[in-house]
Image (cartoon, grey):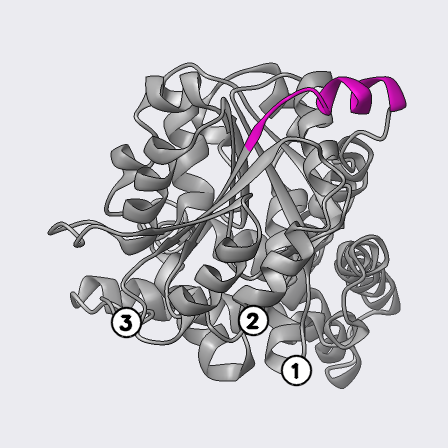
Amino acid sequence: MILITILTMTVLLLALLPTLMFAKNLQLYRPASKSEVTLAAAQREAISVLIPARNEAAGIATTLEYLLKSDHTDFEIVILDDHSEDDTAEIVKAFADRDRRVRLLKSKPLPEGWNGKQHACWQLAQLAKHRWLLFLDADVHVAPDAISRIMAQMLERPVSLLSGFPRQVTGTPSEQLLIPMMHIVLLGYLPIERMRASNDASFSAGCGQLFFANREDYFQCGGHAKIFGSRHDGIKLPKLFRTTNLSTDLFDATDIADCRMYRGYQQVTRGLLKNATEGIANKVLLLPFTILLGGAFVAPTILLVLSFVLKWPLWLSIILGLATFLSFVPRWMAAHRFRQAWLGVCLHPLSVAWFLLLQWRAWIEGMLGRRVAWRGRM
């Protein structure tokens, strides 16, 4: 019973940690500025919106339609067609022919060892006309005030690299369970206050769907060329900036942008696997995060059930009930704040267990030298 008591108190503490961290971080992780004064100043800044596109025919027109409704007064949209095998280039060209703000560029051949997205973003940065660089994924849809508010956020809290997390649109159950895990890991375990107080690379975090930088700092640190082989610019690009002693920050882009990152079980699984080894699924982080996430979000529910089945003392069941309640709180807060599906809240322990199994699978496949193909490339 002593071991069971120790285990019970451990999972209670593990569940309490991300709950308290999440609650604190929600106060710091705010939407982009709405200040009228700052927005007026933001309107005077010229911005290059840079979008790498490979086989994006299904959605690139919608992305451009949203962008062209922007209330910002001075911006260009530069699309780099990365050797698409569909009608991406033709669709973008039709927009460029009727709106001078849109430019279509063709990518150079992919060099050996480079990741396609990093190569495309590096070319886009070099070809951009303006000082401010807004990198967007091709499936990110922005509100009319998005560009101005991102610029205003940069003016209000100046950093070298700013990253926003759009609202993650989910459809299938696998998306609803797994995609919101990005907020659980981010806000449950990253001390945002400490991140903002230093340029320590260990606090690197970002979302590859939306990055904003000034070109001077971008080229000073080497930009995407320095992470040429990476598939996970969400972590690697902020880490590069911080390693060069340049500041980075995060903001909540839920109200100004949305993105359906993956569609269905196959895409969700392959998408998480391709990024995992550059995130949690490595020899340094995998075991600690398995303990942290599994102990906080999976173990309490399992132990609570066992406490009734094996007739443990009532006080242990009460503590495990509290731990189980706490284990659901961060997911509930995330669903409420970021408009996530409630199915993921109800099945949160399953989400975490599934997420961890994918991390271990990615680590094993990495050890075996296997890579997940993405958009026709390894």
Which residue does the numbered mark 2 point to in the structure image?
353
C-alpha separation, residue under disc 1 versus residue under disc 3: 23 Å
Is 338 situated left or right of 176 in this image? Answer: right
Q: Judging from the image, what secondary structure is the residue with disc 3 in?
A: loop
Query: What SS does tag 1 mark?
Result: helix
Q: Earlier in the sequence, mark 2 or mark 3?
A: 2
Quadrant where the image shows the N terminus: bottom right
| Marks 1 and 3 close (CB-CB < 8 Å) | no
User: Compared with residue 306, is residue 4 higher up or lower down, i.e. above or below?
Assistant: above
Q: Residues within 10 Å of mark 1 (few under 14, many from 20)?
A: few
Type of amino acid under label 2:
Ala
* Residue 209, placed above or below residue 40: below
Q: Which residue is mark 1?
A: 173
Closer to us: 178 or 213: 213
**Residue at 73% across, 53% down:** 12
Q: Are marks 2 and 1 in contact (CB under 8 Å)?
A: no
Magenta region: which residues?
Answer: 36-47
The crowding category of the residue bearing disc 2, from other C-alpha atoms within 10 Å (few below 14, some 14 to 19, many at least 20), is some
Which residue is drawn at the image coordinates 32% and 38% (left, top)?
122
Please state which of residues 170 and 22 is positioned toward the viewer in this rendering: 170
Residue that numbered label 3 is attached to: 373
